[in-house]
């Protein structure tokens, strides 16, 4: 019946200060009471500022504060229906972090992301409920050393909620009905992350609130065990959320009891739910949930307890609008349990699912190509050039490697070329944001490409019987000796021209490495990467220090380190761009649509980790072949006369720079065994 259609016809949205929405003053600093239908957006809302101010990175908050998380549900679940949460992209959301300039300045966040989805409510029979809400929650779990141990904190919560009014409620009809929602995710939001000593994860929670069948005095029973949280057990790291939510509920209950005692009321009759800073602090310091906790919750740092909870944008049911903005007493009445009446649903319907938050390019918000070029000069190897390229660069991406030694010394033997991706991460606890970042483990190195061998282990002077990738013309005994020494040896003509290699390599998948953290992201876990180039070689008749000897030379290693930003494996065309209209045939029925929505991710379209190395490598080599052909044609058209002189000038500059570096090392007492990139 139309008179009972109580849910709003417009989508639920968490965007603050949208006309027709009521924003609690507790979540908007500097405002009193409730504000309805504002005439203009607030000054802090960035997309309405024509020229967003530039701010220094050093002046910005790098770590989110700890917050109390809302408990979505009661100990009693209703058997009158069920919920399904539908979000696009298999619950993977891509946000665009703030852009950073070379000067260290960045624009204020402008490109916030709206998480759009729908909540499907399937009812066995017609019932009336008090409220419907959907929210996003985030928890981090960090190992802060042997003294502090593990710390779990809520770091983000935002959602939307529709209230059913006083006695009217929200009528839910028998069968399936869907309600769309929009939740605003800040551009600075921390991304999903997990490591051995730290992780940060997200969930989406939904709740349809009925009337409580039990007295309010039973509320403390939910602290006895985490089994009453009703979170989906399939969610990874679900115990992190259960612990933080239980702790938050316990803190609020202790605060409510304390306020009730202050005014001389029974704890059972107390109605307040204050999160005032002073009261929460007093109870947090002596609070311990369960055995085995290494630390009392939030007892470190400048702010010893969470001072706030998440932000939920609330609105009244559109079919029963209030005649005036709701007051605190109205909200308090809404939170009170109601007696069972005909038509009211007893208990709650709850649902939860995992959510992935990943970051795109701060500049374009699109896929990120790679074109890294490095060159330098190393004694013995001469000038070297390195290039790594990829049309779409991300975790698990295939990259084309091009390493060239145009004119190595004729006394040089090259044994090994290795390309390594090094990953390190640091932790900063939300409880102690002013302390230096903590690094729980050394950097991890992942070899993504290697050709050759450095010789036998512990051998300082590899002989001519050791296989080499390339040997110069002046290496004695090069042509004869052993068959092992002949492997990989170029002909005399090619050895005169130098040595080069082109190959295809693949980065590790997201099971082994995590995306690099953007500078503008506010997160307790920061990840950085380096690309390391290593060449093992020797110069016949020389030691590392240049001393002349008879026989094979001493083994040397050239190492070059370059910082590199590795995007998420979800930053691919299939995730960032719409598919063609004829990509999939339309489902024949509504059940077909539901099967598509609830199906597991297509690994080949969900992220870069799905396709095989053979599939990606073949496509990359074909593109490189076409590109190389075009470059050769352009060089022929321009004429190659001036190219040789330009190359000679570049080699001369690199040699002068290398000699200057060697002199500086000599004056500082260093040894000249390795070279580096500029």
Image (cartoon, rainbow, N blue to C red):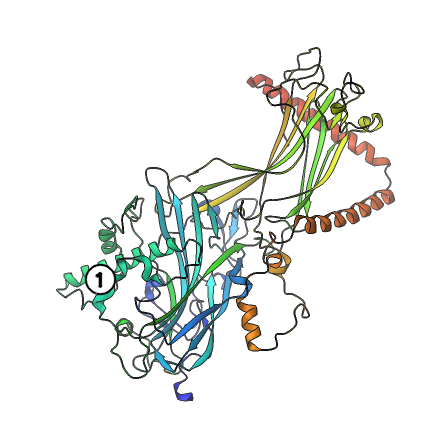
Looking at the rendering, which quadrant does residue 211 occupy? bottom left
* Figure quadrant of the C terminus: top right
Q: For residue 314, what is the image quadrant?
A: bottom left
> In what element is the residue under mark 1?
helix
Q: Residue at x 18, y 69 (%)?
A: 269
Horizontal relation, residue 42 to residue 590: left or right: left
Q: Is 533 situated above or below 290?
A: above
Q: Residue at x 82, y 36 (%)?
A: 643
Q: Position of residue 246 (x, y in %)?
A: 31, 57
Quadrant (top left, top right, bottom left, bottom right) of the N terminus: bottom left
Is 98 positioned to the left or the right of 439 in the image?
A: right
Instruction: Locate residue 579 relative to residue 77 in the image: left or right.
Output: right
Q: Position of residue 384 (x, y in %)?
A: 71, 31
Report whether residue 60 is seen. no
Q: Position of residue 300 (x, y in %)?
A: 30, 44
83 is higher (above) or lower (below) than 452: below
Q: On the image, numbered disc 1 is attached to which residue? A: 256
Residue displayed at 37% across by 76% down: 80
């Amino acid at each position: 019946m139309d008179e009972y259609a109580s849910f709003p016809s417009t989508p639920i949205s968490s965007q603050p200060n949208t006309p027709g929405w009521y924003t609690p003053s507790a979540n908007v600093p500097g405002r009193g009471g409730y504000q309805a239908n504002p005439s203009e957006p607030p000054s802090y809302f960035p997309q309405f500022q024509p020229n967003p101010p530039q701010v220094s990175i050093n002046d910005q908050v790098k770590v989110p504060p700890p917050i109390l998380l809302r408990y979505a549900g009661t100990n009693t679940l209703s058997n009158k229906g069920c919920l399904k949460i539908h979000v696009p992209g298999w619950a993977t959301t891509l946000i665009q972090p703030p852009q950073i300039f070379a000067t260290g300045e960045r624009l204020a966040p402008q490109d916030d992301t709206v998480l759009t989805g729908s909540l499907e409510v399937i009812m066995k029979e017609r019932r009336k409920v008090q409220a419907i809400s959907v929210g996003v929650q985030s928890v981090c779990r960090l190992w802060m050393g042997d003294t502090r141990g593990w710390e779990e904190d809520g770091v983000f919560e935002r959602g939307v909620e529709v209230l059913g009014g006083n006695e009217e409620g929200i009528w839910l009809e028998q069968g399936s009905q869907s309600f769309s929602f929009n939740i605003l995710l800040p551009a600075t939001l921390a991304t999903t992350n997990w490591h051995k000593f730290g992780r940060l994860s997200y969930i989406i929670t939904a709740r349809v609130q009925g009337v409580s069948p039990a007295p309010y005095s039973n509320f403390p029973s939910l602290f006895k065990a985490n089994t009453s949280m009703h979170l989906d057990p399939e969610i990874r790291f679900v115990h992190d959320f259960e612990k933080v939510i239980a702790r938050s509920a316990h803190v609020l209950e202790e605060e409510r009891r304390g306020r009730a005692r202050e005014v001389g009321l029974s704890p059972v009759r107390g109605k307040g739910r204050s999160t005032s800073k002073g009261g929460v602090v007093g109870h947090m310091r002596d609070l311990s949930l369960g055995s085995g906790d290494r630390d009392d919750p939030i007892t470190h740092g400048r702010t010893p307890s969470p001072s706030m909870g998440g932000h939920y944008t609330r609105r009244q049911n559109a079919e029963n609008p209030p005649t005036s903005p709701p007051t605190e007493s109205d909200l308090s009445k809404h939170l009170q349990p109601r007696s069972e009446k005909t038509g009211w649903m007893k208990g709650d319907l709850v649902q939860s699912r995992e959510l992935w938050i990943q970051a795109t390019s701060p500049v374009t918000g699109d896929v990120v190509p790679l074109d890294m070029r490095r060159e330098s000069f190393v004694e013995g190897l001469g000038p070297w050039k390195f290039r790594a390229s990829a049309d779409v660069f991300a975790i698990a991406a295939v990259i084309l490697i091009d390493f060239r030694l145009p004119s190595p010394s004729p006394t040089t033997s090259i044994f090994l070329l290795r390309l390594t991706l090094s990953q390190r991460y640091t932790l900063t606890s939300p409880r102690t944001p002013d302390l230096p970042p903590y690094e729980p483990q050394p950097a991890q190195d992942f070899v993504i490409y290697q050709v050759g061998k450095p010789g036998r282990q512990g051998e300082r002077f590899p002989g001519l019987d050791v296989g080499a990738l390339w040997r110069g013309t002046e290496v004695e005994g090069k042509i004869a000796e052993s068959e092992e020494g002949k492997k990989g040896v170029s002909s005399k003509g090619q050895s005169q021209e130098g040595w080069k290699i082109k190959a295809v390599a693949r980065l590790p998948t997201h099971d082994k490495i995590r995306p690099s953290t953007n500078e503008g992201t506010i997160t307790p876990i920061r990840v950085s990467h380096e690309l390391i180039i290593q060449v093992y070689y020797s110069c016949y008749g020389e030691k590392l220090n240049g001393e002349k000897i008879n026989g094979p030379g001493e083994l040397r290693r050239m190492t070059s380190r370059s910082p590199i930003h590795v995007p998420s494996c979800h930053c691919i065309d299939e995730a960032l761009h719409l598919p063609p209209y004829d990509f999939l045939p339309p489902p024949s029925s509504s059940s077909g649509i539901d099967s598509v929505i609830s199906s597991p991710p297509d690994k080949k379209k969900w992220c870069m980790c799905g396709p095989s190395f053979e599939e990606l490598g073949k496509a990359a080599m074909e593109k490189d072949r076409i590109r190389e052909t075009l470059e050769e044609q352009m060089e022929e058209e321009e004429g190659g006369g001036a190219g040789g002189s330009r190359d000679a000038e570049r080699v001369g500059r690199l040699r002068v720079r290398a000699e200057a570096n060697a002199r500086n090392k000599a004056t500082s007492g260093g040894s000249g065994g390795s070279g580096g990139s500029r």
